Image: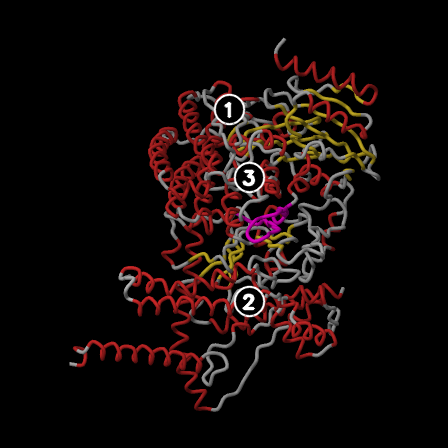
Amino acid sequence: MILTNDYLTLGVFSLIMIGAMILAIILWKLIASGGLFEIFSKRSVVPEPYKRASYECGEVPIGKTRFSFDIEYYVFPLIFIVFDVFTPFLFLWGITYSPYDIELNIFFMGLIIFLAIGMFIAILKDGKRLVTPDYQKPEYLELINKAAEGDEEALNEFLRIEPLTIIKKELTIKRTSSNPLSKYKLEIPEKKDNPIVALIKKILRKLLGWLFRWGLAKSPWIPHLGIKCCALEIPMAVGVSRFDMERWGIIPSASPRQADVMIVNGPVTIKWAPRLKALYDQMPEPKFVVALGECAILGGPFKGSYSVIDGVNKIIPVDFYLPGCPPRPEMFLELTMTYRKKIPTEVDERRRKIIEARNEVLQKLEKLLSE
Amino acid sequence: MSKIDTIIENTRNKLLSNLGKDIEKRELKWPKYVGFNLLNPNRITDAVKILKKLGYAQPLLITGIDRPKEGAIELVYKFNRLDSSVVAWIYTQVPRDNPKIPSITPLWRAAFPHELETYDLLGVIFDGIPDLRHVFLPWDWNLGFPLRKDWDPNLAKQYPWWEMTREYYDPFVIPEDESDDIYYVSIGPQHPAVHGSFRLILKLRGDTILEAWPDFGWVHRGIEKLAESKTFEQIIIYTDRLCYGSSITWNLTYALAAEDLLGIEVPERAQWFRVILAEMQRIVSHLLWLAALSGDLGTFHSMFLYPLREREKFLDLFEKACGARLTYSYIRIGGVGIFKHAEDIPATWFEELRETLKDFKKKMEEYLAMTEASETFHLRTRGIGVLKGKAAVEAGATGPVLRAAGIKYDVRKIDPYLVYDEIDFEIPVGKNGDVYDRWWVRINEMIQSVHILEQAIDAIPKQGPLRVKVPPAKLRGTGEGFGRTEDPRGEAIIYLVGDGKNTPYRIHIRTPTYINLSLLHFILRKAKLADIAAIIGSLDPCMAEVDR
């Protein structure tokens, strides 16, 4: 009966919609990192420095990453935002336009003038601030000075807002040890909850964790990384009609920040290695690595070359090895089956193991460095 | 007196009379090429000026051979012509401890990538080159020059690649006083638009590119150095992996060079079969390019899928013949295939190829109609990335990029190898030299390849050996070997030097994409940021081939 009244229907559905939104936000606030029933820990649990780098193509930016935009770029979105919504009304006005309907005409003219003045003020007020580069702002300069003097809070704040190389360019930070790898040391934080919270957490973890793992296992995303030959087979040949990896839920993703499984399909050279590490750092946890083909596993036919690193596991921890030169697409599809079986059961365990393995690699590197 | 002889005579007379005592005649193994010994390396610019006046088109390759016994680095310059097969070779020597020679880049821009490479790997310093830096090795490499014979490979282990905070930008120094509306963007090494691992540094104002610098070397594996310690037979597997898009044509180029060095004659049936394989590979490579370009243009997802579907059919045929999908190692020294199984082409193989071609022709027509009808395609390709006429020759382009620029130059016609002179085919030539023309040229090349294949299937002898037996004792040679073919991407050259052992003394590979991609510096000037995917795609980059 309620639904026969049009306006009442609208009201009820609006309330339901708003309620659902609020519920979702509350739920998320509870279970996300920092919430009472935190089951998803922070994605950046591993403090990898390259996670914050603004580029996603392996390169680390130098110079100012926050450069000034031309003022015209600011005006475009403003005009768009304001008048995009307004245009349908103008359209209606145009259809029913009559010079004698003075009231309506004045209303619309007034609205346009009002919006134009508002936009102008917006440009005057915020435009200058937005157009000024961050590094020219007084608070930013103050931060730099503080960080340079050794204030730890300022330094952390600086690290948060700016990627790594800039620090090197503009400040000389005194490292605690001369070893550049010392800051890659990883720790897994352990917290103790009270029993009720722990129980609720356990239940939530069971329910949502299942969903999460199911998604991870059934639809791994791979970053768009093409190093050499094997890239033609995987992901290119398996990506199209005959083998069609999308049947298995595998989708190439242009950015490493949305990817789950990195496929290293070629020999890693000394020039590539740091960039590969940077890309790996930018992937969210939990992440997995496939060494595809002989070159990525051990150097393949290029083992012993002056510019090739014998195996990608010297740079990042590898979970799956797929031999072949190049491996056949069918082999890759077989690998996805193995991946599915392994992932859903022990994601957390695996993550722990990965971190341990990575620490081991870093220790080895440290030794190498100290020698 | 034939045309070639007149050109050779003319070149000889002009150079000998102008340079006097500083130059002398050098007898080459090949009567169709002309060679000189330049006794005074400082006069290379004069020699090059004369060659340019005589109508030589491009420096085909510049490379060096380290000769520690003589205390010198021997430099080899090769210049090609657009109208005949004549290649002028100039040999000169610079002292090993002070290897300096005037650069010819100011005279001929096409020499730039070659000179950079020679500096990078051999340490020859070219005086007057605008920007001398490492291309394939990391820019801050200071551990010697790997292609020198006395270089200690253990030195490479000292390179601290694990240091993540190294500043990589430095070869392209950004001036401090640059105004605020100019900014720099680096695209790659991991980026969907760059087809592999390759970086492009752009200087932008708004979204207009003011200048672009390509940065190579991401998959530099040092094949030239590795091959020096492998026997002639073993090197085949490296040529496979030179370019993943066209393994067979690189097999072929190497086999031609090695047979030239070792003096091996190939049976006629094998020659025809090589033509069939090379043309199939051209189609496969172009299909891959077509898919990648269509993907880059953004609006053609069907045209990304269809060419790759057709490609699979050709890959099946390759698989039936040799067992591999991508890295075939099928063309060997002395013929085709492993000797014992050389006769193992399945009886129905040629018939299947014929059927595939029939199907392919129909499909091509369909795809062409589909693409030509798309207005977006024309808007995104016409008048974009223009490089035409003499500018393309001057800059050093070869292959489809040069042909799209309106220059009729194809090694298969100009300097025929195998049995190409018995086959009837045309060279498609573009007009405007833009992305659309490159697309058009490659599409028509595929059609011509089908035409060649149909002739070759009819003409190939039904019986006969596919490979001659070469005893191991014969697999060692002295002198030079020169293999010059038309790769799907341009003119491919492998230059071999032997010293009587079963391994080559020096192998130099001229990869067409390296030169074609260094053209980006010109093509991208004044282009829009949104067009770079289309422009890079139209050059058909293959980064493994660029970096070697």
Q: Which residue is mark 2?
A: A127
Residue B440 is a magenta residue:
no
Q: Position of residue B366 (x, y in %)?
A: 33, 36
Is residue B159 depicted above or below B255 in this figure?
below
For the N terminus of chain A, the quadrant is bottom left
Residue B208 is a magenta residue:
yes
Instruction: Tell me which amino acid carries mark 1.
Output: Gln
For the C terminus of chain A, the quadrant is bottom right
Q: Tell which of A327 and A81 is nearer to you.
A: A81
Q: Tell which of A152 and B97 is nearer to you.
A: A152
Q: Position of residue B442 (x, y in %)?
A: 47, 34
How has the structure been colored for display? Answer: secondary structure
Q: Which residue is mark 3?
A: B240
Magenta range is B194-221
Relative horizontal placement of residue B275, taking residue B134 as reference (left or right): left
Q: Is residue A218 visible?
A: yes
Distance in Å between CA atoms under marks 3 and 1: 19 Å
Q: Position of residue B107 (x, y in %)?
A: 71, 31
Q: Dividing the picture into quarters, in which one does residue B516 lie?
A: top right
Relative horizontal placement of residue A94, taking residue B200 as reference (left or right): left
Q: Position of residue B123 (x, y in %)?
A: 76, 41
Residue beneath the point at 65% across and 13% down: B5
Q: Dividing the picture into quarters, in which one does residue A360 lie?
A: bottom right
Q: Residues within 10 Å of mark 1 (few under 14, many from 20)?
A: many
